Image (tube, grey):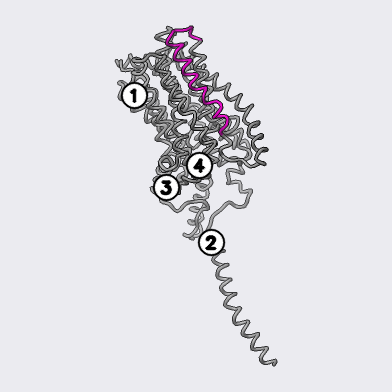
């Protein structure tokens, strides 16, 4: 019996030994994988931008906010001087006059498709530096242009290069600041896209009148050059995966271990990464009705805003006989409307969201973001009817400006980012509805379509107004805006079903 028990125990030991060896090998493999993966040196690693001193973080966010403002200033600062530009270049075609302003947005449409993946591959800092140097060069070229063809080419390239702060500025904020503390930082970076297109013409009108239209470009170029000097002195790389890749490269050289890899780096080649960055937004636009319809609505409203910008010179200089400098002040109508919208949004948004959250026991769907868009979208067509017919009948100049303030108010609730609440309904709805990478691609798709409408929709204005006048011409755009009103209502009621039925595999 004893000998049999001994044999059983020996057999058990023999069975266990290979299992122990297998466990040791798998543990060794896991350990090897952990050793080969280069990560931060603990949660308090000072190289991690999340652990930088607050003053350093604030400095980076401030620099990104300033350049974002300056670049967006360029979208409309030349608008009041467009008539002087056309006279210098001996042009009489009103479409070319509109295109001289809006072609900058065509660059804004195409630039982000390349800038975003480049910043993930090579880092934010090289993209900022190279793109802003290019922006300054072609902004100067706009001022030195000798004919309209040169001017349009230079302005388009300046738009492509200048899209980088709007494209990767949010990435910089995400690199530096945890989600729960990003409100103030997003507030700073959002000021430029909201207010710069309105402030630009106010400044540009007086510059064009006193110094000439060329100085509207040279002054912005000088300001951006000062920013570039500060950025090259104080800014550092913030993209975590890029910093870790540099660390892994250094360790591979020091240790000779070629298997070391940075955590968070994808396996795609640079060319494949760029191709993916280009294809995902287009894929979502084609295959997702949620992205397509909402992006079309936002793009149309954005295009209407720039259409208004392109008509102010003809209405207030030619019809109301404003001086070029004073004509820039009429853009404040939309600005006042947008500021009013910010106040209303800040007052109403939290109350509505809290009420709906309590009704649904704290659970929030992406569709709960849309009520304010539903309520305020009818204000846009009201503004166009008001602006068009008061300008047509030559009512006292304050009346059409009041109409533009309604357009600004309605625009804000549809498409513009706000510093008070991170994003307004259309953008935050896309973020909530499409998580992570899909959300970024959905926003990119909306941005591309929005910039394309902002570029080309104003080109329809001269012929339309020449044939129909400001009354019926603006009424047509008002009726189209009315036709889009059911879009947010449809998504509010059926958005969840549409998202589930038309899921896009990325």
Q: Report the residue marked by disc 4.
A: 439
Q: Residue at x 46, y 38 (%)?
A: 291
Between disc 2 and disc 3, whose residue precedes?
Answer: 2
- Residue 372 as seen in the image, left or right of residue 296: right
Q: Main secondary structure of the magenta part?
A: helix
Where disc 2 sits, the SS reads helix
Q: Report the residue marked by disc 1.
A: 151
* Residue 171 in view, yes or no: no
Task: Give the Cα distance between marks 2 and 3.
Answer: 24 Å
Task: Give the Cα distance between marks 3 and 4.
Answer: 17 Å
- Which is closer to the viewer, label 1 or label 4? 4
Q: Residue at x 39, y 13 (%)?
A: 314
Where disc 3 sits, the SS reads helix
Q: Position of residue 180 (x, y in %)?
A: 63, 40
Contact, mark 4 vs mark 2 (Cβ under 8 Å) = no
- Residue 215 as seen in the image, left or right of residue 67: left
Between disc 1 and disc 2, whose residue precedes?
Answer: 2
Q: Position of residue 281 (x, y in %)?
A: 43, 41
Where disc 4 sits, the SS reads helix
Q: Residue 390 lies in magenta, yes or no?
A: yes
Between disc 1 and disc 4, whose residue precedes?
Answer: 1
Task: Give the Cα distance between marks 4 and 2.
Answer: 31 Å
The front one of 335 and 229 is 335
- Which is closer to the viewer, label 3 or label 4? 4
The front one of 54 and 353 is 353
- Looking at the rendering, the stretch of residues picked out in magenta corresponds to 370-398
Q: Report the residue marked by disc 2.
A: 33
- Residue 7 as seen in the image, left or right of residue 64: right
Indicate which disc residue 273 carries.
Answer: 3
What is the crowding at mark 2: few (fewer than 14 residues within 10 Å), some, or many (at least 20)? Answer: some
Quadrant of the snapshot with the N terminus: bottom right
């Amino acid at each position: 019996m004893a000998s049999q028990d001994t044999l059983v125990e020996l057999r058990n030991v023999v069975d266990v030994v290979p299992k122990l060896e297998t466990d040791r090998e798998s543990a060794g493999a896991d350990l090897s994988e952990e050793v080969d993966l280069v990560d931060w040196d603990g949660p308090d690693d000072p190289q991690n931008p999340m652990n930088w001193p607050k003053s350093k973080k604030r400095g980076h966010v401030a620099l990104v906010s300033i350049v974002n403002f300056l670049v967006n200033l360029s979208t409309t600062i030349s608008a009041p001087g467009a008539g002087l530009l056309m006279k210098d270049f001996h042009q009489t075609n009103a479409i070319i006059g509109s295109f001289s302003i809006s072609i900058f947005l065509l660059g804004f449409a195409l630039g982000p498709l390349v800038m975003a993946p480049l910043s993930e591959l090579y880092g934010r800092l090289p993209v900022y530096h190279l793109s802003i140097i290019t922006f300054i060069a072609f902004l100067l070229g706009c001022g030195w242009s000798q004919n309209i063809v040169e001017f349009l080419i230079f302005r388009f390239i300046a738009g492509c290069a200048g899209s980088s702060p709007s494209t990767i500025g949010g990435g910089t904020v995400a690199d530096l600041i945890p989600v729960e503390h990003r409100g103030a930082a997003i507030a700073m970076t959002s000021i430029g896209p909201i207010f710069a297109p309105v402030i630009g013409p106010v400044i540009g009108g007086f510059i064009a009148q006193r110094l000439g239209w060329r100085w509207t470009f040279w002054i912005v170029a000088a300001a951006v050059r000062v920013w570039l000097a500060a950025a090259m002195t104080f800014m550092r790389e913030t993209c975590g995966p890029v910093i870790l890749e540099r660390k892994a490269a250094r360790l591979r050289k020091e240790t000779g271990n070629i298997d070391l890899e940075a955590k968070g780096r994808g396996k795609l080649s640079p060319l494949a990464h760029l191709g993916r960055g280009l294809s995902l937004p287009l894929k979502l636009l084609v295959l997702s009705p949620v992205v397509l319809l909402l992006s079309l609505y936002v793009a149309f409203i954005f295009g209407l805003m720039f259409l208004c910008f392109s008509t102010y010179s003809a209405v207030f200089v030619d019809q109301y006989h404003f001086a070029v400098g004073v004509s820039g002040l009429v853009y404040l109508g939309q600005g006042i409307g947008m500021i009013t919208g910010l106040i209303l949004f800040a007052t109403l948004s939290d109350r509505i969201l809290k009420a709906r959250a309590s009704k649904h026991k704290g659970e929030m769907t992406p569709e709960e973001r849309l009520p304010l868009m539903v309520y305020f979208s009818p204000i846009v067509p009201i503004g166009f009817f008001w602006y068009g017919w008061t300008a047509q009948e030559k009512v006292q100049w304050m009346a059409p400006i009041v109409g533009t303030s309604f357009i600004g108010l309605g625009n804000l609730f549809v498409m513009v980012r706000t510093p008070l609440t991170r994003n307004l309904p259309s953008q935050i709805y896309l973020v909530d509805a499409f998580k992570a990478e899909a959300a970024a691609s959905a926003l990119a798709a909306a941005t591309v379509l929005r910039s394309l409408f902002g570029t080309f929709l104003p080109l329809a204005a001269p012929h339309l107004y020449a044939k129909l006048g400001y009354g019926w011409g603006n009424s047509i755009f008002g009726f189209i805006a009315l036709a889009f009103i059911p879009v947010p209502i449809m998504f509010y009621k059926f958005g969840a079903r549409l998202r589930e039925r038309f899921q896009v595999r990325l």
